[in-house]
Image (cartoon, rainbow, N blue to C red):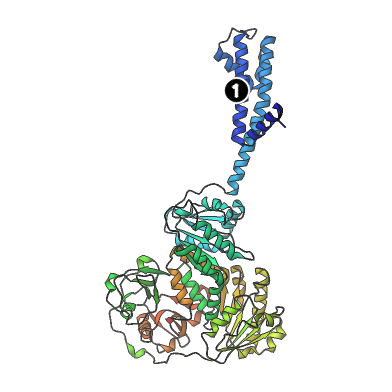
Amino acid sequence: MKPTFSQKLKYRFDNFMSKGTIALIVGLFSISLIIIVVGTIVLTAFSIQPADGDAMGFFEAFWQTLMRTLDSGAVGADQGWTYRAIMFTVTLGGIFILSALIGVLNSGLESKLDSLRKGKSMVIESNHTIIIGWSKKVFTIVSELAEANANLKNSSIVILGDKDKVEMEEEIRENVPDLKTTRVVCRSGKSISMKDLAILNPFEAKSIIVISPEKDDPDADVIKTVLALTNNPNRPDKKLHIVAEINNVKNASVCLMVGKDEIEVVLSSEIISKITAQTCRQSGLSLVYMDLMVYEGDEIYFQNQSELVGKSYGDALSMYDNSSLIGIQKLNGNTIINPKSETIIEKEDQLICISQDDDTIKLNGKKSQIDSSVFTNQPNQKTQIEKTLILGWNKRGVTIVHELDAYVSEGSEITIMAQIDQIETILQDEFKSLKNHSIQILNQDTTDRDVLESINLMQFNHIILLSYSSEMPAEEADSITLITLLHLRDISEKLGVDMSIVSELLMDENRALAEVTNADDFIVSEKVISLLLTQISEKKELSQVFADIFNPEGSEIYIKPMSDYIDAGQEIDFYTVVEAARRRNETAIGFRLMQFERDASQKYGVKINPRKSDKIKFSQDDKIIVLSEG
């Protein structure tokens, strides 16, 4: 059926109205102009003028008509009924049109402000750090980046979250009050949308951190985000530096396949498991890891030192007074942590050092002879039969058990106690490949005092408290961990024994509550992964360094008795300790003074990268922190 004229007119009007605020403003302005011009033509064509005035030209008539359109009160002073009638008609049209125009302008302004509030405008930044995703990890990452960029005048962080822009900004101000010289820009959008990612100006960014979302299948979103970044058809010929958090190790290969050489993957669950397994066997190790990961204090740097070319790694260890050499990065990118002492430093090698800053890595070491008479001749400790108790359970528990199996002797035992339905059935096939451990699984309430006292806690060398992160919300899971920890510490005090306890917490704010229990170590999952993501985003090469340190093969960080190296009570400098460790194919990087093991203000006695020329007298209980193969 052929449309009528009115239908065509209505259709075109609807199309015009759908073009938005600018089209409406232009339309209303055009109608106003038509009314003014028509009124002007009538006045001049028929020589209509005020009763008390002279004849008007076109421009004077146009002006008078325009004034009546804008100011409805002006018509009250007009004289002559013909003139009044025309001006009244113009004024009446102006009232309707101007009112509509004001309404449209107001609506358009509100719409624009709402758009700005939602954070949809393009980010004009360069050399910035982008954080994609929103969780509590953001606060630690922003805080650490602000610390890392404190010496820069114009640094910026851009955050994309599926949340209101203003809410994100308020939460950051509340949780990170001191941003130093760093500017934070928030944008709202979906991480898997190319359009939303484009507003972050990602191809001008220094690095991009992709955080795992808090949902059932977080890895899928992370992989899609990486895919959207790397396969954008409009991207320039420039490599990205992406650091992505993946939970399931099975998804890591897919993420690497998508990101290729532009991505570094942080396996959050596996890393927490490795740290927990290593820390439970060495009290204070979590403090060492945290010290190396935070930007307050000493960090890991890479530097070419041409003066050391041709010298051995062992000789180079004592050539730094206020830095600690820990390894070598070869030209092909491979890193060697704690290489053999006789390893020769080559021209293209980058030396890996712990130092306060990159400009503090200087060859200012000691040249005098070391008194070897203070060295002890303790044999290297070998693996031994150990009993470990795991209280609570989550998906990381399986990896922790397998990691522990790589460190102990055959005949060791692990007891798992957790209140989870059918836990015996769930885990029956998980531990068949263990070589050194036998497993006992108990379905019991870990917060029940009678249950804890019934299992003879004194028989265990190590106790691990795992959060029920797979079963309940973070706050509730941490509450169960804290209650269990309080029971364990009370039992320990009443029995007069010192239990080695490692506790996994999900929320960093609960750490302060847990510290009243005097527990040995806390693994705050959220914070550890946040720190690691930040470190790798600033220095891509650190990914391989931390991977080597966390791996049971090769060299890891150990906290060993001082008596294995030096006679107690001798006043020595740290050069002596470095040499004692070198003779055992180890690299000494610090110490722990046990008199401060409960003193937070002294970092629990942990000192990484001490000045080697400073004199110190170790007691019998003190520890040496080394990189070693065992």
Q: Quadrant of the N terminus?
A: top right
User: Which of the 4 quarters of the picture holds residue 487?
Assistant: bottom right
Q: Is residue 233 rendered to the left or right of residue 492? A: left
Q: Could you say where residue 584 lies in the image, as x and y percent from the top left?
A: 38, 87
User: Residue at left 65%, top 72%?
Assistant: 470
Whether 170 is drawn above or below 420: the answer is: above
User: Which of the 4 quarters of the picture holds residue 55?
Assistant: top right
Looking at numbered disc 1 in the image, what kind of residue is underneath it? Leu
| Residue toward you, 437 or 535 | 437
User: Residue at left 62%, top 17%?
Assistant: 38
Q: Could you say where residue 620 lies in the image, as x and y percent from the top left?
A: 46, 88
Q: Could you say where residue 391 lies in the image, as x and y percent from the top left?
A: 64, 81
Residue beneath disc 1: 33
Q: Secondary structure at mark 1?
A: helix
| Residue toward you, 329 or 68 | 329
Q: Is residue 332 visible?
A: yes
| Residue toward you, 347 or 487 | 347
Q: Is residue 303 rendered to the left or right of residue 230? A: left
Q: Is residue 503 rendered to the left or right of residue 325? A: right
Q: Could you say where residue 86 lies in the image, as x and y percent from the top left?
A: 67, 14
